[in-house]
Structure formats: C-alpha cells, structure tokens
Amino acid sequence: MQALDSLRAEIQTINAQILALLNRRATLVCDVQARKTQDGLPTYLPEREQAMLDALLAQNQGPFSNETIAALFKEIFRASVALMEQTKQAQSKLPRAPSGQTRRITIRGAQIGADPILIAGPCSIESTEQMQKIGVALQTKGLRFVRGGAFKPRTSPYAFQGLGEEGLRILRDTAQRFDLISVTEVTDTRRVGLVAEYADILQIGARNMYNYDLLREVGRTRKPVLLKRAFSATLDEALASAEYILCEGNEEVILCERGIRTFEKNTRNTLDISAIPLWRQACDLPVIVDVSHAAGRKDILLPLARAALAVGAHGVMVETHPSPQTARSDGQQQLTLPEFQTFFEQLFPPKA
Amino acid sequence: MQALDSLRAEIQTINAQILALLNRRATLVCDVQARKTQDGLPTYLPEREQAMLDALLAQNQGPFSNETIAALFKEIFRASVALMEQTKQAQSKLPRAPSGQTRRITIRGAQIGADPILIAGPCSIESTEQMQKIGVALQTKGLRFVRGGAFKPRTSPYAFQGLGEEGLRILRDTAQRFDLISVTEVTDTRRVGLVAEYADILQIGARNMYNYDLLREVGRTRKPVLLKRAFSATLDEALASAEYILCEGNEEVILCERGIRTFEKNTRNTLDISAIPLWRQACDLPVIVDVSHAAGRKDILLPLARAALAVGAHGVMVETHPSPQTARSDGQQQLTLPEFQTFFEQLFPPKA
Amino acid sequence: MQALDSLRAEIQTINAQILALLNRRATLVCDVQARKTQDGLPTYLPEREQAMLDALLAQNQGPFSNETIAALFKEIFRASVALMEQTKQAQSKLPRAPSGQTRRITIRGAQIGADPILIAGPCSIESTEQMQKIGVALQTKGLRFVRGGAFKPRTSPYAFQGLGEEGLRILRDTAQRFDLISVTEVTDTRRVGLVAEYADILQIGARNMYNYDLLREVGRTRKPVLLKRAFSATLDEALASAEYILCEGNEEVILCERGIRTFEKNTRNTLDISAIPLWRQACDLPVIVDVSHAAGRKDILLPLARAALAVGAHGVMVETHPSPQTARSDGQQQLTLPEFQTFFEQLFPPKA
Amino acid sequence: MQALDSLRAEIQTINAQILALLNRRATLVCDVQARKTQDGLPTYLPEREQAMLDALLAQNQGPFSNETIAALFKEIFRASVALMEQTKQAQSKLPRAPSGQTRRITIRGAQIGADPILIAGPCSIESTEQMQKIGVALQTKGLRFVRGGAFKPRTSPYAFQGLGEEGLRILRDTAQRFDLISVTEVTDTRRVGLVAEYADILQIGARNMYNYDLLREVGRTRKPVLLKRAFSATLDEALASAEYILCEGNEEVILCERGIRTFEKNTRNTLDISAIPLWRQACDLPVIVDVSHAAGRKDILLPLARAALAVGAHGVMVETHPSPQTARSDGQQQLTLPEFQTFFEQLFPPKA
C-alpha cells in the first residue's frame, strides 16, 4: 500500500482529470443540442441516456457497484440537461432576484412591492351598504386596497356562492367612490374577461393554484394577479404556478402565503412564515401574507401581521366586515370595523 | 345537602324536563321555518341567534358560566338548524347508503360498483402505437377499462402538457378497436363538451377537486365522472365535491383515493386506506384506488392493490406504458407491459 | 300554525326554561360530587351517564332523533364534568395568564420573560477550545446564554452521540469563565441529577417532549426547564407536557417552538409562528423560538428571528460553531462566528 | 461544429474515461481508509473534502458552473464515503432481507413472523376480573397474545396513569393462567428490568420511539421488543430506532405501524399501509399493524385489519375490553368482547 501522502496526491490528480472530462463532456452535449435544434430534433431523449448507461455498466469493474455508477452518471446527465436548459432558463419569466430588488407594481398611484400595504375587506361582498362602510373605514385611514369576493368557491354546494356579477358591480362602484384598488377572485376560465372588466387585481384563490388553465387565462390579461398558495402546495409549486402566469406575458404577479394544512388545529391553517424570505430569495415578485385565512381566528391577527412585516412581506391581507356575526361566510375570522381600526393603529403606529 | 339518591332522582327528573323542552323547541323551530318558506323569507338568520343568546346570557345566574351556557345553546341552535335542513338533506344528491348497497354504473356491459375492476393505461397518451400496445395487453386479459391523459396538468409550464384533442382521438380509436371503456381527464370548463364527445368517463384530477365550476360543468353532462381526492383534501371535502356533481343531476360519480400529502417521503403520497371504508359508509358511490399516484414507485403496487381490494374498494387504477423509460411523464411509476401482466395475474390469480 | 311572532315568543320562553334547568342541574351535580368526595367515592362514572342517556332515549318522542338527543346531552354531561373539575383546575400548575404578565425566571442576574434574550452555541460540545471561542464571542456582545449538547439524541446509533459527562464539564467551565448561563439537554431519567449538577437550565429536546417520566424527573429538580415542542405535537400537547413539570413543583418552565413536520421540504421543519401568541394567551410561561432547528438552513435565520421577536417571543435560540463545516452534527445549519456577529447586530441594531 | 455522430462518439469515450477514473479514485480512497484505520486516525474529515473542493473550483473553467462542479464532486465524495462504510454496513445489526425470509420469533410455542397473529387486550390493565374475561375470550379462540398497559403514558398528568407494578402482576397471572404471551409497554429506563421480569414482550410506545436511551436499555434485555412507529416518524427513522435495539445485541424486534399524524380528522391517525411492504423490503423483521390506534374508532377495524394482512403484515393488534364504556382510557376505540368475537371470525373465517 502506498503511503498516505502519495495516495492523497494521486486522488488530487484524478480529481483534476475528472473535472476536465466533465467540462469537456458538457461542451460536447451543448454542441449536440445546438445541432439538434438546428435540425429540428428533440433535444432530450431518455432512451439514449439509458443506452449510454447500459454501455457504462457493462464496462464497470468496480469497486463502485453498478448502482453507484448509475447514480453518479445520472447526476452527470442531469447536470448536462440542466446546462442545456440554461438558455431556456434565461428566457424564464420567473424573475430571479440576484439584486434583491423587488419588482414594483403600480396601480393608480398605489405601489405594491415597496412600503408595506394593507389589503382589507369582507370575505364576501353582500351589499352596497356593507361595502360603503368598508370604503369609509379604508379611506379614513388612507388605505388604498379593498378586497371582497363575488364568486366564492365554497366547500358545500349549498353554501352561499357570492353575488356574482352584481357583487363585481358593487365592488367597482366602491372602488371608484373611495379611490380604492380592488382585489377579487376569479374561479372560471370563462369568467376571466368579465372579472377583469370590473376589478383592478385578479385573485387566484388557494383552491385554484393548481388550475393551470385558469392561470394561463389570467396570464393573458393585463391585470395584476394575486396568486394564493394552495394550502397543500410546496413553495416550489407556488413558484411554478406563478410561472404559468408570467409565461403568458403578464409580469405582474403578487405571491400570497395564507397558511398550509397541518395536524395543528388551534389555527385553521399553519402560517408558513419561512415562505416569505424563501420566495423573496427565489424571485423578485412582491410577497404578501393573508393573516385571516392562516389563523382562521381573530385574536392573533395582530401578532401574525407584525411577524409578516418583520420577516419581509410587502403587505398584509386581512378580512373585516361591518357585522361579522351576520356575515354570509367566514364570520368568526373577520374583524369588526372598530377591531380593524385597532388592528391598523397597532400594526402601523403613528411615528412621533 | 340532600342524600345521594335524592340528588340523583332530581337530576333524572330535570333530564326528562330538558328533553321535553328540547323537542318542543325543535317543533316550534320547524314551524317557523315552514312559515318563512311560505312567506319567502330567509330561514337562517345568525343575528337572531345572537339576539336570543344575548337575552339568555343576561338572565344567566350560574353556576354555569356564560361561556358554557353560550356553548350549550349553540349546540341546541345547531341541532335545530340541522333539523331544518333535513328536508333539504332528503333532497341531497349524495346518496347515503343505509343499505350498504353500492350504486352500480354500467357502460357497454362493464360494471363499476360490483366485481372489482382494473383501470390501466399510460399517464399520457403519446401515440397510436403506444395505445395500441396497451389495447392489446388489456384485451388479452379480458380487461375493459383504459386510462390515458390528453390534457395533462403539469407543475411546470414547460413540461409536456399532453397531445390535446389529437390524444382524445387516439384514445377513442383505441377504445373502439379493443372494446374498452375510456377514462381521461378534463381540466377546463370550456373543454368539458369536447372531452365528453370522445371519452366514456370524465376524470377530475386531484388538482381540480376544488375547482367547483368544473365540477358543476361535468355534473351537467351525462357521462360518469371519476373524481380524485385532492392530495390535501379531507374525506368530507371530497364528498362535498362529489355533491357538486350530483347536484347538477349527474348521478354517476366514482370516488378515487390516490394518496394524501404527508411528511413521509418514501412514497410520493401516503395512501389513506381508511378512506375506502369511510366513504363506503358515508354514501353508496363506488370507490376505487389509484395505486400508482399513491406510491409514486413500482415496487409496492401489488401489495397496495391487494390492500385496496381487501379493504373494500370496487377497483384499482394503475399506470402502465409500453416503454416507461421514454415516457413523457411519470416514467418511474409506470409498469412495463410484462410487469403489468405479472401484476394482473398476482392480483387476480386464476381460480382453480 | 301559529303566527311568526307567537312562535318566536314561545321559543324565547322555552330557552329561558332550559337555561334555568341547566343551571339547576349543574348545582345538583356539584352537590353529588361534594357528597361523593366526602364518602370517598369516585366522582365520574361513565356507566351512570350511559344509564341516564338510555333512560332519556327511551322517552324521546322526537322530532329530534335519538342521535341528536344523545349528542346534546353528552354536551350537557361534559359541561357538568367540566364544572366539577374547575376545583381541580384551580389547583392546576399551568399558570393561566389573565393579566398578560409573563412569569420571569431569573438566573444570576439574567432574566427570561422580560427583554428578548439570545441563546447561542453549537449543536454539540466538542472541545474546550471550541467552547472557549463561543464564550468569547458571547461575552464580547454582552450575551448571557450559551447552549451546547453533551448527550445528543441522534437518529442513527452510529452517529456521534456527544461527549457525555466530559461535555458537561466543558460546558460548566465555559459558563463560569465567561459568566454565562448554560442550557443543555437531558435525555434519560437516570441522568437528570448528573446534568443538573453541571447546567443552569435543563433542556427537554423535541424527541422527548412525550417522555413523561423524564418530564416528571426534571420537575423534581429546582433547575429551570427549557421544553421544546415535539415536531409532531399540537400546542395543547406541549402545554400538557409543561404541566407534567409544573405538577412536580418546578415552576420555571420555558416553552420553545422549533418547527413542526409538514410536507414542505425547503425548510427542515415548518416554524409555527402562531404558537407564540397562542401559548402566551394560554399561560404566563416565557416562550422562545429555536430558529436553527425550524429552518435547518442558515440563510433565513435572521428574518425568522425578527418574526419571532415581532410576534412576541421572549427570545431566540440559534446554533453557532467556530467551524461548522467540521462540526460533528448539524453542520449546515450552524452559523460561523462572523455570521453570528452579523446576525446579532442585525437582530439587535444599536439604538442611536 | 462536429457532426452529430462524431459528437456522440466522443461523449461515449469521455464517459468511459470518467468511469475508469471514478473507480480508480474509489480504490485509492479505500486504501487511505485502510491506512488510517491501521494508524488509528479518523477516517472521514469534512475539512479535507472542503480543501479538495476548493482546489477543484479554483481550476474550473466551465462551462459547468462552480455550483454544478461542487454538486457533482459532493456526490462523488459521498459515494466514496458510502463505499468506506460498506464494511461497517456489513456489521449492521439491521437485517437486510435479500431472501425475503422473515426472521421468526418464537415464544413458548407461538411464532411471530410466520402465520398472521392477533394480539388483543385492553388499553389499560384495570383489574384481575377484567383481564380474566379477556383471557377466557382469547383462549376460547385459540389466540396466544395478550396486550395491556400497566404504565400508561397519557397526555394529561391528571389522567389515569396505569396500575403500575400491580398491573404487571395481573398481566403475568393472566398470561400464566390462560397460556398467553404478554405484551406491555415500558416507558422509563429505570423500569426496564422490572417490566422484563413480568412480561414476555416489551412494547416501546409511539411516544418513545425517539427515546434512544430506552431503546438501548431494552436492547440489553433478552426479551423481544415490539417497537411502535412514532406518529410523526418517517419509515427510515423507525428502522434507525430498531437499529438502536439490535445494536445492543437484542435481535428480536417487531416493527409496528399504528398510523401517522396528518390533516385528516375522521380517523385519529392515518394508517400508512405502504409502511408494511417498504419495511419488509428493507429488512427481515416481522411487521404488525395496530389498527385500533390508527383508526381511533371501532367501525373500520375489520377492513383495516384485512388490508393489513393483504398487504403482508405478520399480524394485527387490536384493543378489546369487557366494558369499553367504563374503561379508564381509550373507551371509544376498544371492542366489546362480542364485537371482538365477530371481528375475529370475520378476519379469520373458518376454512371449509
């Protein structure tokens, strides 16, 4: 057996040789791709990979087992495919954020992605009077964003499903009267045009985050889209859903964390606070937090909103209703207007 | 203090008085409802409940705290509302199964809900040749159900999204040639009509279980619907989604368990085997299990399928592909045709 | 049928009668309990409840079904049992926090439960040199709390299990030399005495939160206990575990949230930020957050720590190591000392 | 640019060169290890890996990025470490099951790991009379395994904690009288000796699966151990816990799946049926299923038990109690003796 130093020196040399071969191989793979693209051939063929692998395993004399060799070469193949896809990646619509700068979305003077915003309003739009009270409450505080559902996806087909177009009309009128930016959900590809006529921001609800046809359709509008993470979605899946919208040419997507489903039952969902820094790291889209749906209860909305801003969210969404106990949906998690007043003042205390 | 026996006797008497009052109250509530329905008034008003509760709490002298009294009366109110809704429940389209008899769905001589069935085919329809090989494999074994995706909901917008209508055409031709019943997914309300022209059974994928507009739309067709549980859905939510379809008049719904999302990573999802007896208890719809998506790997499909049949499922769905290693989606979980042959023979061994 | 008003008036009357009967019943139940306690009889007998229920169901003439009546009376029984247990509750060691005041724990001039604290140190104690570097880093910043494991519970029996008593000795020496308060984990009932000799605060790790024998044993010491929530524990279960310690007379318990296990894989665990306000609402124990174990990665520790303080935590725990890449456990989540310096300065910026 | 064929040929050649270098490198690494072991040096030094990597990255000229090169070499390093550890692996106590043969455990003529067994009994041992009724019920059916808890880990410190040694005595007497094999839980390292004196099989409960000190202690006895998977444990973690027992020389471990914690609330836990084939594939230990704790309800125990046997479990554990409604723990999930009789007959129907 060689001495330790000699063994180590030889390992070092082999490392360098492998390095050179890996890079040479990568260059060749890119050349193959270029040629194929030129000739209009498919660039990735798993069966060719399999053939290459089979050839290698036939030559393998150990000590690495065939399983190990197969695993290592699969990594090498994967790296090569990734390299080939970098050109596509360069075209990817999901704006990676090396600069740490957030893409700003501006609507009638209001900005998303800069100073923290507050989006507030009822779960469902129920009447003009209801929305007017909301409008007054928001305008008084200098707030600019109002939310409210006209098409409500409800678990039971027998539950209140929203006022539909009538609700959209009320929302638009409220927004105009109080100079607000409106956010409302769209649930059906066939209604994207209709909702886009009335609303300023199209919301994709948590239940529709995987509804790729709908994502494409809102991607074809020129309205900003507020995309809620499904309560079962990984962070990566949410980014992939954003990419569906961006792909169609709509660059104004706002990501929204609203809690994920876990075993804990004191809260309706578990607010995944780590989502905010991780999404901000992954891309430059603005990120907000819907504290009402995360908590499903009113008594911890303020601390959760504070945590959201502290962790780097660009805003908070919260449900408020002039009369939550008679609300047609989500009664117990909506703040009364006085409670909302307190929430607002404590979240954004006036600076001395 | 009274003696123990005397105390107990008085408790007994009070129990009986409460019982009588509860039932009298229930009768009155139903009368109120009947009158309201007659007069076209809304039957459930949360604010009236709140007023009644406030009145009661004002009178409460303990020893029960206001919280306890409120909690008990909310139960009583809830029971009354439930009673009022029994009439609607009687009209509920979700067929509760007191008899234990499963609703059978018959398509061209093949039955779902009786003897266990096997639905097999590739993840994606890729070519006529591919589907023909599948067709031969199924027909040889006397199998009647073929699956295959033409519109594929994929996490990445850059992944293969299915052949679209061309895929539907291949599926229909395969079904005709080999006398098979075809199952394929529909993902967009605007395409329900198109898919219904080509396929025998419309599949709602796991990602669309909460897409209520789509559920309503397939509910308006007269094609059986295979409804997959979302990987984050509770059993009750899946039943509520079935009800959306039934509501529209389509009575032929097949429930499909395909695994839920948990922390365990050896399987792509965790097959919730308890779903089958619990759904069968809750309603009389047929229930099947998609073992491929539950496991996300091939090596345990046979034991999982055996468990599914042992627990009472009416069938099993499994992915098979003539050449999984070159498949355009879900390569590693699809059985080769020889593997499928073995799977079939071991799941349904020939009787001596 | 009566008119609506008349029906409503009668319902109102019945409500009041039920109220009176419920309270009378509650008084009688408490009398029964008092008598039984006097006579040394068991106070809660489920079989008597069943007998009462059977009697009631035999008398039930509807319209409420037997199921509904059983459900309502079970609520009533449960409320009565709860009332009986209020006396015991009054003796509960879990300090409910009506005042919102947190119980403070003071150790050699350092306070937990007042201004936010920072507990830092390596995953495992590895050598005197290592701990000395940590000690210098902490002392320079005026920090008082040091953590480090001597008995490490590791998933694999072949992984490094800690230096044992030698580690405890190094920890104690470091604490003395740099005037620090030490926190270290105890995993075995037989070693509680030993660890208590060396350490200032006994840590119960996430894996041992359900180890009730161990909880009781640390409850018998007079050392403060830092109790980590198991990664699968509900908030209520964590409080119940705290109660095991308090029950034995040890009033100094610190609750620690460190992430729960979910399907999301970008973080090792999902930090359940809602735990902090909910625990603070439920009791007056101090609450801290271990950001290192929640994240399992270094790049989001700062935002998570900010969120923890914003949401109301009394402190943050973080892992740091002079040389993470050679650490014997948890290498990739431990901050280097320069990284820790930055983390500290950004979390607690010097006030102008 | 070269022609496609020529490019491919060169890739092929490079593949072969990389293969040869990888294997040569592996041989050298093993030589290094051998020399180090001889000289008593630590065999794995992460900092040396880092140095090698730094050297490589300094030489990297692309097109692979430094990140990719680092990732690929980390795989190569990992494979080398894995190869070095194969010797240790050969000594691993976790019996990998290449043959598919299950290790059988024999106790007084009863076998675990062969024909399916049924382990039954109450949650808690409460009295001699109770256990005698159980004993009669088991003996009549020819069943050999009885379960019952004497030391009960309960969420609340105020709940019934078991009869302790008195319970053990009752269990032993019942076992002797009815020729049964007894299974009971041990929760404290200090009581392993005591419990081992009375019981035939030591149970590690789900709450203690991560209690490594306890695992080691039962590993030092010569009693078979029934190891329950924690409700939050991955399959791999459960195997690692088994290894703790095997490491100490105790080869008789029975793995037990009893449900994991998920969002679904119709069942207390979600039975992870895939655990059984995956564990059986990973090792040759017998595997059983505790259907009572998985379901937490009685009405689906029979289908779950059938699924367990169909999927390949070596047995089923179920709770039964002469009078569940008065049981001191887990009342609603325990079968009455007549229900148990039916369960048994339907699970094991007499062969014609």
Image (cartoon, coloured by chain):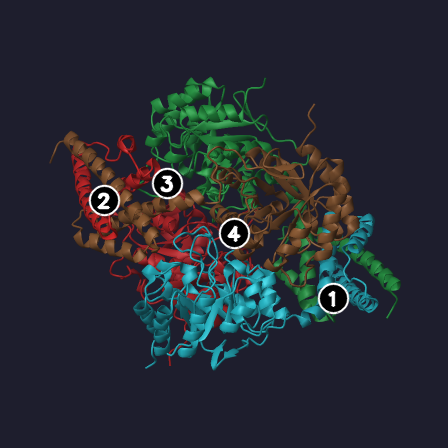
Chain colours: A cyan, B brown, C red, D green
Q: Nearer the viewer, mark 3 or mark 1?
A: 1
Chain letter belonging to callout 1: A
Nearer to me, A159 or C199: A159
Label disc, if present, on residue B232 of the rendered structure: 4
Q: Which of marks 1 and 4 is in front?
A: 4
Q: In this view, does B116 lie to the left or right of B85?
A: right
| Displayed quadrant of residue B155 | bottom right
Chain letter belonging to callout 4: B
Looking at the picture, which amino acid does disc 4 mark?
Answer: Ser
Mark 1 residue element: helix
- Report how far apart the C-alphas of labels 1 and 2 lie in the structure: 70 Å
Q: How many marks?
A: 4
| Displayed quadrant of residue C65 | top left
Looking at the picture, which amino acid does disc 3 mark?
Answer: Arg
* Callouts 3 and 1 in the same chain: no
Residue corresponding to mark 1? A84
Q: Whole-percent x and y of residue B82? A: 36, 46
* Callouts 1 and 4 in the same chain: no
Q: Does residue C100 appear anywhere in the picture?
A: yes
- Report how far apart the C-alphas of labels 2 and 3 lie in the structure: 22 Å
Q: Are marks 4 and 2 in contact (CB under 8 Å)?
A: no
Residues packed near mark 1 inside 10 Å, few (<14), some (14 to 19) or many (20 plus):
many
Residues packed near mark 4 inside 10 Å, few (<14), some (14 to 19) or many (20 plus):
many
Label disc, if present, on residue D154 of the rendered structure: 3
- Report how far apart the C-alphas of labels 4 and 2 lie in the structure: 38 Å
Q: Are marks 1 and 4 in contact (CB under 8 Å)?
A: no
